[in-house]
Amino acid sequence: AYTLNHAADIFAFTGDAAEAARCRALALRINTAARRLAYDPQRKLFAENPERKLFSSVTNILAVLSGAAPSADAPGLLR
């Protein structure tokens, strides 16, 4: 999702609005799935897998950068 969001910016800058919209829509689907499958609301962290047994700072940093993380939880995810 992180790369797709940046690709969308590039497509928009070059005037390809349709491709930008396609990239943004796919990034949104990926982020939605990540929240549904990997976000643990009690811990307010993203897990490495759907079983939610392993957590890492890298996963949570990428969740923030990609936009998957709820904005209210972002500061805690970056600690």
Image (spheres, grey):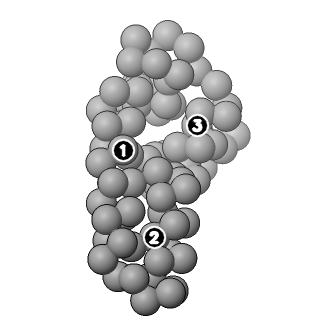
Of callouts 1 and 3, which one flags the residue occurring earlier in the amino acid sequence? 1
Q: Nearer the viewer, residue 12 or 47?
A: 12
CA neighbours of label 1 inside 10 A, class few (<14), some (14 to 19), many (20+): some
CA neighbours of label 2 inside 10 A, class few (<14), some (14 to 19), many (20+): many
Disc 3, SS: helix
Please tell me in which quadrant of the rendered image residue 51 appears. top left
Mark yes or no: residue 3 visible: yes
Residue 54 in the image: above or below residue 19 = above
Q: Residue at point 43% right, 89% down?
A: 15
Question: Mark 1 sits on what residue?
Answer: 30
Q: Residue at point 51% right, 86% down?
A: 13
Of callouts 1 and 2, which one flags the residue occurring earlier in the amino acid sequence? 2
Amino acid type of the residue tagged 3 in the rendering: Asn
Question: Mark 3 sits on what residue?
Answer: 60
Amino acid type of the residue tagged 1 in the rendering: Ile
Residue 37 in the image: above or below residue 21 = above
